[in-house]
Amino acid sequence: MTKKTFSTAINDALHEAMRIDQSVICYGLGVTDPKAVFNTTSNLEKKFGSERVFDMPTSENAMTGVAIGAALNGIKSVITHQRIDFFLLAMDQIVNGAAKWHYMYGGQSSIPITIRLIIGRGWGQGPTHSQNLQAWFAHIPGLKVVMPTSPEDAKGMLLSSIFDPNPVIFLEHRWLHDTLGDVPSGDIRVPLGKAKIVKAGTDITLVTMSYMTVEAVHAANYLEEKGIVCEVIDLRTIKPLDWKTIMDSVAKTGRLLALDSGFTTGSVSGEVVARVAMEKFSILKSAPTRLAMPDVPEPTSLALTKGFYVRASNIAEKVMDMFGKNTSDIKKDLPEPSPHDVPGEWFKGPF
Amino acid sequence: MTKKTFSTAINDALHEAMRIDQSVICYGLGVTDPKAVFNTTSNLEKKFGSERVFDMPTSENAMTGVAIGAALNGIKSVITHQRIDFFLLAMDQIVNGAAKWHYMYGGQSSIPITIRLIIGRGWGQGPTHSQNLQAWFAHIPGLKVVMPTSPEDAKGMLLSSIFDPNPVIFLEHRWLHDTLGDVPSGDIRVPLGKAKIVKAGTDITLVTMSYMTVEAVHAANYLEEKGIVCEVIDLRTIKPLDWKTIMDSVAKTGRLLALDSGFTTGSVSGEVVARVAMEKFSILKSAPTRLAMPDVPEPTSLALTKGFYVRASNIAEKVMDMFGKNTSDIKKDLPEPSPHDVPGEWFKGPF
Amino acid sequence: MVHPIDSSSIENSLSLFHQMYRIRMVEEEISRRYPEGKMRCPVHLSTGQESIPAAFALSIKKNDFAVSTHRGHAHYLAKGGDLKAMIAEIYGKATGCSKGKGGSMHLIDLNVNFMGTSAIVGNSIPVGVGLALSAQLKGTDQISCIFLGDGAVEEGVFYESVNFAAVRKLPVLFICENNLYSVYSPLSVRQPKGRSIANMVDAIGVGTGTCNGDDIYSSQKLMQNAVNKVRSGTGPYFLEFSTYRWREHCGHDFDNDLGYRSEKEFLEWKSKDPLINLEESLYKTGVKLGEKVDSIKASINSEIISAFKFAETSKFPDQIEAYQDVYAKEELSK
Amino acid sequence: MVHPIDSSSIENSLSLFHQMYRIRMVEEEISRRYPEGKMRCPVHLSTGQESIPAAFALSIKKNDFAVSTHRGHAHYLAKGGDLKAMIAEIYGKATGCSKGKGGSMHLIDLNVNFMGTSAIVGNSIPVGVGLALSAQLKGTDQISCIFLGDGAVEEGVFYESVNFAAVRKLPVLFICENNLYSVYSPLSVRQPKGRSIANMVDAIGVGTGTCNGDDIYSSQKLMQNAVNKVRSGTGPYFLEFSTYRWREHCGHDFDNDLGYRSEKEFLEWKSKDPLINLEESLYKTGVKLGEKVDSIKASINSEIISAFKFAETSKFPDQIEAYQDVYAKEELSK
Ligand SMILES: Cc1ncc(C[n+]2csc(CCOP(=O)(O)OP(=O)(O)O)c2C)c(N)n1
Ligand SMILES: Cc1ncc(C[n+]2csc(CCOP(=O)(O)OP(=O)(O)O)c2C)c(N)n1
Ligand SMILES: [Mg+2]
Ligand SMILES: [Mg+2]
């Protein structure tokens, strides 16, 4: 298998979905422009025509309702927003409409729409281009929430999202778009609602999601050298959440660190800690804990985002601490990359 | 002191605020109409004029931004929405704008706005007139979130909210509007960020908010007869949350039941359970737990909301269960009121 | 406007009467029974506004789409929605058109492509536009009709929806019932003085027509022409009808005593009632016709009685139903 | 449009030149240095669009309010914002106008009532309307100016804001820079064909004026008249200027190679550049004037050099600053 990037995997999934099902359409700001939403929508219009693939007015709310209406007549829309933050304009349609439609009409209609939302970070994205609002969507009955990490999952879960009969919020972290991985060709489906154990372990359970998984694995590798074997669970789906995989793991390890790319208070990681505390109280060997973004908007300046994100070092420190081990070397062993505000060398701004 | 209703207390606070500060204005759909938003805005226009008190177009998003702009020039707006659900249209302005303005401009301007949102329940309010979204607002840095229970707190906290230099989401439960209590006259302030121990106890800590406090106290009184003395903490402010009062109580009781009027997953009660589990793990005598609304939109039919809400009986059952006591009498001792879908006899629908 | 009806239009006039009378009587029966406290959900009645749905009923095809608002009973009925299922829904019964989950503000009848209504002002407007997009994509000649009030016009989503419909030339018919009020708020506190909604929509980029809703024949003509126009594929169209709600905004009663509008205004509108006027015209045209009118009335009245009986005697849904249908379960094809 | 300048307008022409040249050179210097990777935030430059802010600068009072968008450098400067603080902000320094927290898309200078800009399209529009409401409440003669692009016009919040401004007759001046594109999307995929934004706004209920942004004198006249009109208390007004962005939507480079617009279109607009045209006219009018132009250029160039030096040599904020200012702390008076 040739390695592909996460964004190519997304593009593959969109081509595949549109190929096998005429009723799939794809729209959003810039979907047909030369940059093709970080190359995720490349060649779709050329291949499937401008009836099914199109740009749109800057009208996030109405365009969400349009997808609902089209869904009522069997059209499966994939809408793309270059930043999740823009989608705040569409909360009425997604929460009062899409999420409840199936329920409030007694199960007669369903709303098979997929909303791709890209999460920004670094290079001065600042307060309104960097939010991680998975906790919001997870709070709303009727929505599914997907946050893949690997290119393969990106493809397989996007396909599953598109063909799921419910509204799915599909969150892509911008820092994953250029990561590489094996991506099977064709119509592959990775089921929604199943977490993935990306690293098996016995000593502590790390629950994580999306880009945070990259940091978690990095930390877990380091911790293994120090004699602590972490089990790293990539949630992949935030709602419905795969509680069984988490509980089974905690039953084995007796310890939990939940990670999150969103603000701390009211985060998904808080929900994970709460459920584990409620259900596994008696077998926990130490207090469950979490690491998430501070309850602070993301600042713009390079200087202010230094040390601002949860990094492998913070994870390693927290875990070592839980085991009562010395943490003094960690910052040296796992330094924050420099520059710290880009996903890699290749990234030259601005978005 | 004469007893006053919660809605009169709100009305008192608005009169007081507008009287003592010329820069306070009050607007929203129906604010000046004959029903005066469940009598909460009565006589304001008459007293303070139609420049400062006015109705508005059905444009929730823009009207939130208008308050931000006015705030930048020192005007303190109190906006009222008859249901929280309508405010979903304004998420961009409140989250991308109001919540971050002070921060993203380096602390130079502040946004002293108060958004009154009424939470509906029962009499067929249905999926889009009954949501409790305190968890959403609590997740956003920069917002304060207030949910008073008693008439006195309603008045004192509304005054504090109006004069707080930050955007405050002020949530009023419709089922509280006609409850009675002592309400001091004049400019009384109940500080934000301080929970209230509404019933002292030693055996278990019940953390609750808004209308759920009424049920909690009811349950606590019953439980006391059964020999379990609950400490009932009315959060009053959801953000910033008074962690000290909770932790001190749990340190004493060793047990926690967090209650919530919102959907279960990602609820404030989950956050309470998580923090208590993280910080008080070693002194907890049993697994911390919570009771919240199911992860289900609120249905409309009288038949479907039967047993749907968390009631005193559910709370009592849960607590008795935690103490290993027999729960078989509870449903009989604490029956769901009939009809169960109204706050009291006086309520004849439709809103 | 009581005048004898010429012979060529008798059938049509009877149909219009049938539609208007049926809607009126359904709403009035709800009003009469609402205080019993068995219809435990907010209801927004269309009493006084019947001419527009009546004109719609006679202009639209069954497989055309429609969506509506909190004030949706009339539109549901005009589109051919099942009366029994609607009343049962308002009573919260398992036989309701939404199984009791939605109530008066969430009506649906997929048999006649009445796709839904919303309790959130403006919320169903883009949904109707999306239905039109689906028809365009599928190459059918279906059109999508969107009912909305003058208040909904103030929501940004209305404007966004009109704009997008124009950009993609979608087969949408917007039908605005301008009843001068949004709850108890007059137009003057909500929209610029003297501003015409239709003119504005025209300038946004969608062709428009306006009509006095009292004038039932003109309303019908305008509606039919607009439906034909949209069906012909020339893009969206917008209609604004002036009309008046007789009863309170929400609930069963009259509310002129509240003072937000004058009894005089109400009586003026009432005196122009197209239903009573048409009824009188029909009676005036001849005894035979009078008998037909009477038989329409009788059949509607008995239809309504049985719909309420159906609703009252239907079972409530099981409590367990509250927890079902949160997610659609079936795997979609493909 | 290169023609000698008559003596009565020389001072004014020099002022216009000063404003345009300053904005141009600031943006060009940002372009030149951006690839160094030290300005680590998205930048949206106004190169090519300078005539509108220049006309604005000469028409507005210091205590009038203004808000703008992601493409806000020019408006900030035209309103009298501090150049050094702006450049420092783009460099993420503690001396930046938002202490490094906001970056290029969050400019503010409270000394000149430039109240803020937003990275969310349309987001600052109602904020500007709220400022106008505050002026009306306080009974001052301040007006509030709102810059927006042709893309922002598509947001429902724009429409809602215009409507409310009209209802309350607020002293708002909307200034739309129609540069034909929203990112790489032409108007044709976003707005109805042939639809005029200004005509639409007029029909919503707000008076309008339009102008070719290349025509600097007409732009100035329109702007000044509109400012006067709004200040006179007759309510809101809306201006639409046609203009063209030279460089890429976001970032420092040119991007005609992408293919979303043609090199030809770009060159046509460039050939009408009001800055170069004015410069040539000024030179043509006489040697003395030419010298004045040269000295303006020299002083601006050195001002820019020192602004960049200021930014580069300023300190970064302390890391701890990231965690401050989440909440405003001071108790408000009363
Ligand atoms: C977004 C939103 N805002 C406010 C309301 C409250 N509300 C319910 S009906 C209504 C009136 C709307 O007026 P209009 O569109 O003219 O319809 P009408 O009731 O006159 O038929 C309002 C404001 C709501 N349901 N949704
Ligand atoms: C709500 C929202 N949607 C989308 C974007 C992405 N975006 C950034 S700038 C821009 C272009 C807006 O076009 P216009 O208003 O014409 O301004 P211009 O860039 O042409 O000056 C868009 C769509 C955004 N920032 N906010
Ligand atoms: Mg109306
Ligand atoms: Mg533009």
Image: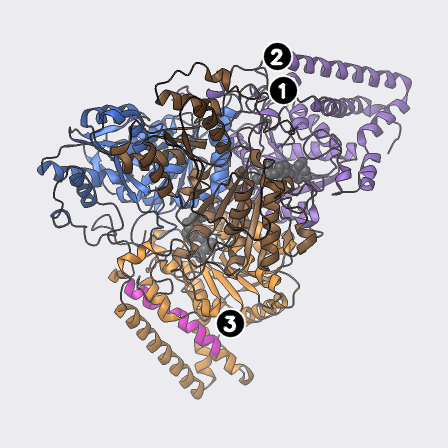
Chain colours: A blue, B brown, C purple, D orange
Q: Is residue A293 above or below residue D181?
A: above
Residue B249 falls in image quadrant: top left
User: Chain for mark 2?
Assistant: C
Across and down, in percent, residue C157 comes to 55, 42
Q: As shown in the figure, which amino acid type bears the numbered disc 2?
A: Ser
Binning the other alpha carbons within 10 Å of mark 2 as few (below 14), some (14 to 19) or many (20 upward) gives some
Q: Can residue C160 be seen?
A: no
User: In the rendered image, which residue does mark 2 sit on?
Assistant: C314
Residue in the picture at 35% in, 59% down: D103
Instruction: Confirm or deny contact between disc 1 and disc 2 (CB under 8 A).
Output: yes
Tell me which numbered mark, 1 or 2, is placed earlier along the sequence. 1
- Say which of B137 and D135 sits in front: B137
C-alpha distance separating marks 2 and 3: 71 Å
User: Chain for mark 1?
Assistant: C
Residue in the picture at 33% in, 78% down: D302
Across and down, in percent, residue C137 comes to 49, 31
Q: As shown in the figure, which amino acid type bears the numbered disc 1?
A: Tyr
Across and down, in percent, residue C48 comes to 76, 32
Q: Is residue C109 above or below residue B79?
A: above
Across and down, in percent, residue A296 comes to 35, 50
| C302 displayed left or right of A210 | right
User: In the rendered image, which residue does mark 3 sit on?
Assistant: D62
Q: Which mark is residue C91?
A: 1
Select label 2 or label 3 by which is in front. 2
Instruction: Confirm or deny contact between disc 1 and disc 3 (CB under 8 A).
Output: no
